[in-house]
Image (cartoon, rainbow, N blue to C red):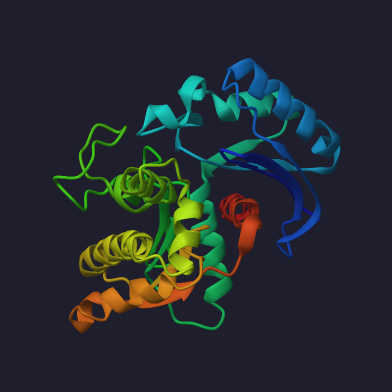
């Protein structure tokens, strides 16, 4: 039996799991909080502590990580998101810890692949977009039944697609990126300005659910921006379906609002919208499945 040690590195948690590559099921799983110091040495120590108990049971390591994975190095379009971890040699570090063949990809790309393989046994889907609307906005693309990772790991980084040329400045250096307009962080920032009090995106969303019209307008504005992005990518890439995930994307009514705005557009701009089904382990299982497949070819 081939066993993968899958690792999912996010802004709040790092999860590790042993995955049976034949069934793509998790055998054993553990997670820790992501170190907030963002010093490379501290992250390395945390990874070593988490991974060492699993090493002797695994054949290889598959990493799903926030940010851009460019030839094994962790970087970001918006360096503020990674702080001291920018340009972190992720694959080399984990390979040094485990002494196992190690591969890495972006976490949204990994989740996109897992959503795709979960859908395709019952659907004839060639081109699929996965969007996670959460603290930030990320994505993954499957075109002609193949996950797109890109030569520099950039493919699917839709959070930095401009939807409002006059919008706020993004940390990536462009103005009006959808991440600055529609993400959970953006919802919180817009709400804080409107209500003249510090609010998180979750708190603004809760106000909307309670019937606050100003908060509801913020949520609708976010959903309308995501719908516009979906329409643009559908007419560009001939998408069959779009899977919506993330804490905002899966929040009550949000996907319904996206559908409302898409319904106002001509039929060619309206792919089939699906709610993500794979949950918190999509990154682990997607990375394990993708790299197991690459090894078998």
In this rendering, would 187 be left or right of 291?
Answer: left
User: Does the rendering let one see residue 160?
Assistant: yes
Residue 143 found in image quarter: bottom left
From the image, which quarter does the C terminus lie in? bottom right
Residue 263 found in image quarter: bottom left
In this rendering, would 244 be left or right of 15?
Answer: left
Residue 268: horizontal and vertical position, in percent? Answer: 21, 79
Height in image: 52 above or below 155? above
Residue 80: horizontal and vertical position, in percent? Answer: 41, 28
Q: Residue sitting at 22 percent across and 64 percent down?
A: 232
User: Does the rendering let one see residue 109?
Assistant: no
From the image, which quarter does the N terminus lie in? bottom right
In this rendering, would 204 be left or right of 46?
Answer: left
Q: Residue sitting at 48 percent across and 68 percent down?
A: 210
User: Foreground: 225 or 30?
Assistant: 225
Residue 56: horizontal and vertical position, in percent? Answer: 85, 37
Height in image: 271 above or below 107? below
In this rendering, would 260 be left or right of 8?
Answer: left
User: Foreground: 289 or 40?
Assistant: 40
User: Foreground: 29 or 237?
Assistant: 29
Residue extending farthest to the front is: 196
Height in image: 290 above or below 236? above
């Amino acid at each position: 039996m081939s066993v993968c040690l899958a690792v999912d590195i996010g802004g709040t948690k790092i999860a590790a799991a042993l995955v049976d590559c034949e069934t793509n099921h998790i055998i054993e799983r553990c997670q820790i909080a992501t170190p907030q110091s963002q010093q490379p040495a501290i992250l390395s120590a945390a990874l070593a502590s988490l991974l060492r108990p699993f090493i002797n049971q695994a054949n290889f390591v598959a990493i799903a990580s926030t940010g851009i994975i460019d030839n094994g190095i962790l970087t970001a379009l918006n360096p503020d998101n990674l702080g001291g971890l920018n340009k972190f040699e992720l694959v080399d570090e984990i390979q040094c810890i485990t002494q196992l063949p190690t591969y890495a990809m972006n976490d949204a790309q990994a989740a996109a692949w897992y959503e795709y393989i979960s859908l395709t046994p019952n659907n004839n889907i060639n081109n699929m977009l996965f969007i996670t609307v959460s603290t930030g906005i990320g994505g993954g693309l499957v075109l002609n039944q193949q996950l797109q990772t890109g030569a520099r790991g950039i493919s699917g980084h839709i959070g930095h697609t401009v939807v409002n040329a006059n919008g706020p400045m993004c940390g990536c250096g462009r103005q009006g990126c959808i991440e600055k307009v529609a993400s959970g962080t953006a919802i919180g920032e817009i709400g804080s300005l409107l209500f003249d009090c510090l609010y998180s995106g979750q708190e603004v969303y809760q106000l909307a659910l309670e019937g606050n019209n100003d908060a509801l307008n913020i949520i609708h504005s976010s959903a309308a921006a995501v719908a516009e992005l979906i329409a643009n990518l559908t007419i560009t890439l001939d998408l069959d379906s779009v899977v919506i995930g993330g804490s905002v994307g899966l929040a009550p009514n949000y996907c319904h609002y996206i559908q409302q705005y898409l319904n106002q557009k001509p039929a060619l701009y309206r792919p089939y919208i699906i709610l993500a089904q794979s949950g918190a382990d999509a990154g682990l299982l997607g990375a394990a499945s993708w790299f197991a497949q690459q090894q078998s070819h």
